[in-house]
Amino acid sequence: MLKNCVNLKPANTMKKNKILIVEDEAIVALALQSNLGKRGYAVIATVDTGEKAIHKASAENPDLILMDIRLKGPLDGIEAAARIHAVLDIPIIFLTAYADEEKMERAKLTLPFGYLLKPVQDRDLKSTKQLLNAREYHE
């Protein structure tokens, strides 16, 4: 009967999704890292600037990037996402505490995987995991 369930795998053999967190508020980054770990993600790094995000994404090739729109330094999250997207096919979800229309329009140009409003809720992370798993299933 289980022969027809091609994608059925025991939970302990499932690959952990590798996540890169790009967030310049340490408390927010730690909370995200903790919540993601509880959901079965492997947070490969937490960085606080756009420059570090580009470098870490290139070096680690994560399955997903959670990118704050407002970051320290000369590159905001939108510009960092655009540079990453230009060379890597990594889904990026923007994190934002503000619904600034101009920034949202700029962010749309990077073809993000989605947006999460801060503070990020547990149910949002659950939905994100489901979408990411569906994306991987179809690739």
Image (cartoon, grey):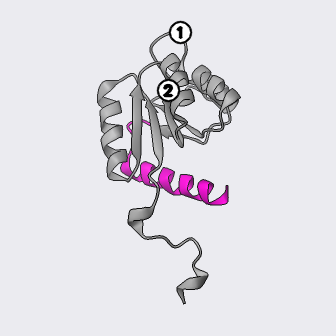
Label 2: element kind: helix
Q: Residue 15 at what x, y percent from top left?
A: 47, 55
Dot in front, 1 or 2: 2
Figure quadrant of residue 136:
bottom right
Q: Amino acid at mark 1?
A: Pro
Q: Amino acid at mark 2?
A: Lys
Q: Which portion, as a residue range, is magenta? A: 117-139
Q: Does 90 appear above or below 37?
A: above
Decide if residue 99 is in sight here: no
The residue wearing badge 2 is 56
Inspect the magenta stretch and tell me whether residue 118 lies in it.
Answer: yes
Quarter of the image where the C terminus is located: bottom right
The front one of 103 and 128 is: 128
The percent position of residue 32, horizontal first and vertical second, equals: 36, 39
Crowd class of label 1 (few under 14; some 14 to 19; many from 20; radius 10 Å)? few
Seen as rendered, the residue at the extreme bottom is: 1
The mark tally for this picture is: 2
State the CA–CA distance, disc 1 to disc 2: 17 Å
Lateral position of residue 117 relative to residue 112, left or right? left
Query: Which image quarter holds the N terminus?
Result: bottom right
Q: Position of residue 126 (x, y in %)?
A: 43, 54
